[in-house]
Image: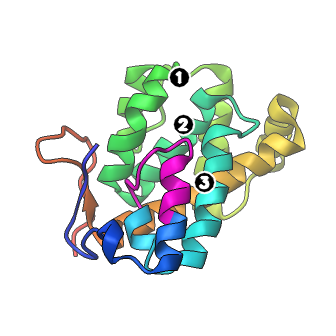
Amino acid sequence: MTDTAKRMAPLALEAMTPEQRSVADAIMSGPRKGLRGPFNVWLRSPELADRLQKVGEYLRFNSSLDKRLNEMAILMTAAHWQSPFEWYAHAPMAIDAGLAPETAAALAKGERPTTMKPDEAIIWDFCTQLRRDRTVSDATYAAAVAAWGERGVVDLIAVSGYYDAVSMTLNIGEVLPPEGAKVPIAAPKK
């Protein structure tokens, strides 16, 4: 996957500071295998990049939430922030994990999907209320705890917040999907 950035041009490995190179090597040798998405921007602050990439690695690869549900929350975040790169990177993963393409299409439009499974409806309600109301209702909280326990609720909050930071970074860095990629989300207008 080759992404483009209008701001903060990609850093060449040989031009990185020792701190940047150490973090870049850690990211490239981990499960991501590359410096796509927000990492080029985050490397401008190597200590922050290292801490964020470790949180992201947990949330993406080790969350207590089912991958389909985790990816649904990520797509809701991408749609909220109008982050085309985030959508481009995660929509195929969500569908591969079992999210119905029509559910993903509705999420891209910011609409409540009509094809959701019961656990996906909890994700929709929780993430929608969290962003809109800055909290969730007692009923939504109880449904989430019943479905995934308190650990799952914490992981859902964290994946939403982490991908808020990712999407903001991608939008500010103007990190875009490869030219010609079909993405149903347009970047925000400046």
Q: Quadrant of the N terminus?
A: top left
Q: In this figure, which residue is indicated by the disc labeled 1?
A: 97
What is the spatial separation of the Cα atoms under label 1 and label 3, in whole angstroms?
18 Å
The reply to whether the magenta stretch includes residue 158 is no
Front position in the image: 157 or 40: 40
Magenta segment: 24-38
| Residue at (39, 50) in percent of width and height | 86
| Residue at (45, 30) in percent of width and height | 93
Residue 64 seen anywhere in this rendered image of the structure: yes
| Residue at (53, 48) in percent of width and height | 29
Horizontal and vertical percent position of residue 188: 27, 65
Q: In this figure, which residue is indicated by the disc labeled 2?
A: 71
**Disc with the residue nearer the chain's start (2 vs 1):** 2
Circle 2: residue type: Glu
Front position in the image: 73 or 132: 73
Asked if labels 3 and 1 touch by Cβ distance under 8 angstroms, the answer is: no
Above or below for 66 versus 88: above
Asked if labels 2 and 3 touch by Cβ distance under 8 angstroms, the answer is: no
